[in-house]
Image (cartoon, helix red, strand yellow):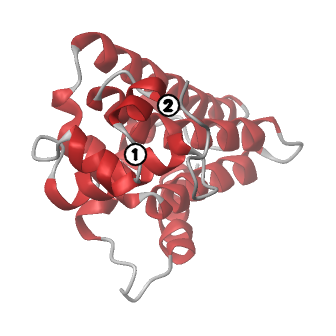
Amino acid sequence: MARTTEGSGVPVPQRLLAAATRLFAERGYDRTSVQEIVEAAGVTKGALYHYFGSKEDLLQEVYSRVLRLQQERLDAYADADAPVEDRLRDAAADVVVTTIENLDDASIFFRSMHHLSPEKHKQVRAERRRYHERFRALVEEGQRAGVFSSATPADLVVDYHFGSVHHLSTWYRPDGPLTPEEVAAHLADLLLRALRP
């Protein structure tokens, strides 16, 4: 059985994911070999296959771990005891910040999603749909309460916001003029202005 840390103190799965993320971002998924990943992580192929069944499993996990984090945070915002406008704004800003903080993961996924098998693709789409549905429920709650305009269907509002989020990797630069929090505030404000009655 593979050891959990293999020397560096960092758990092997995290080392493999970090190495895979860096290499997929630099070279592309299809141009990165399993051997290059294990060498960069300082582990054996046996360790990789102990934790991940394949390179494709690594690709799926690169995206799924960010989505799990975002889902946990969205659930916390949605369940908070605060006005719906505040909860939606916090959730809208959070998905921007967490995407920017994990920009390599997001860009890898959108560039390489077509490499996933139909079954894995379906799993990831189901995870994303669950997230989008919870986000949409906040919009619908505000629309029912009259806090948000119902002129635009909630689905379109959600697609509008996430279209912006999904394109962050094409233009956002850490050394650019805006911090992640500033970008998040601007995009959340745009969303709420679009929903104003």
Taking depth in this image into account, of 151 and 82 the one nearest to the observer is: 82
Going 16% across and 50% down the picture, which residue do you hit?
28
The quarter of the rendered structure image containing the N terminus is top right
Which labelled disc corresponds to residue 132?
2
Q: Which secondary structure, mark 2?
A: helix
Residue 185 in sight:
yes
Q: Identify the image quadrant of residue 157.
A: top left
| Earlier residue among tags 2 and 1 | 2
* The residue positioned farthest toward the right in the image shown: 81
- Residue 26 located left or right of residue 173: left
* The residue positioned farthest toward the top in the image shown: 119
Instruction: Provide residue 27's location: percent of width, then percent of height.
Output: 15, 56
Q: Which secondary structure, mark 1?
A: helix
Cα separation, mark 2 vs mark 1, equals: 9 Å
- Depicted 60 relative to depicted 174: above or below: above
Instruction: Provide residue 138's location: percent of width, then percent of height.
Output: 65, 35
Which amino acid lies under the numbered mark 2 shown in the image of this protein? Answer: His
Going 23% across and 33% down the picture, which residue do you hit?
113
Taking depth in this image into account, of 145 and 168 the one nearest to the observer is: 168
Q: Could you tell me if the residues under marks 2 and 1 are in contact, i.e. CB atoms within 8 Å?
A: yes
Which amino acid lies under the numbered mark 1 shown in the image of this protein? Answer: Phe
Taking depth in this image into account, of 42 and 119 the one nearest to the observer is: 42
The local crowd at label 2, few if under 14, some if 14 to 19, many if 20 or more residues have their Cα within 10 Å, is some
Instruction: Provide residue 74's location: percent of width, then percent of height.
Output: 66, 41
Circle 1 residue: 162
Instruction: Provide residue 91's location: percent of width, then percent of height.
Output: 63, 49
- Residue 119 located left or right of residue 31: right
* The residue positioned farthest toward the left in the image shown: 31
Which labelled disc corresponds to residue 124?
none
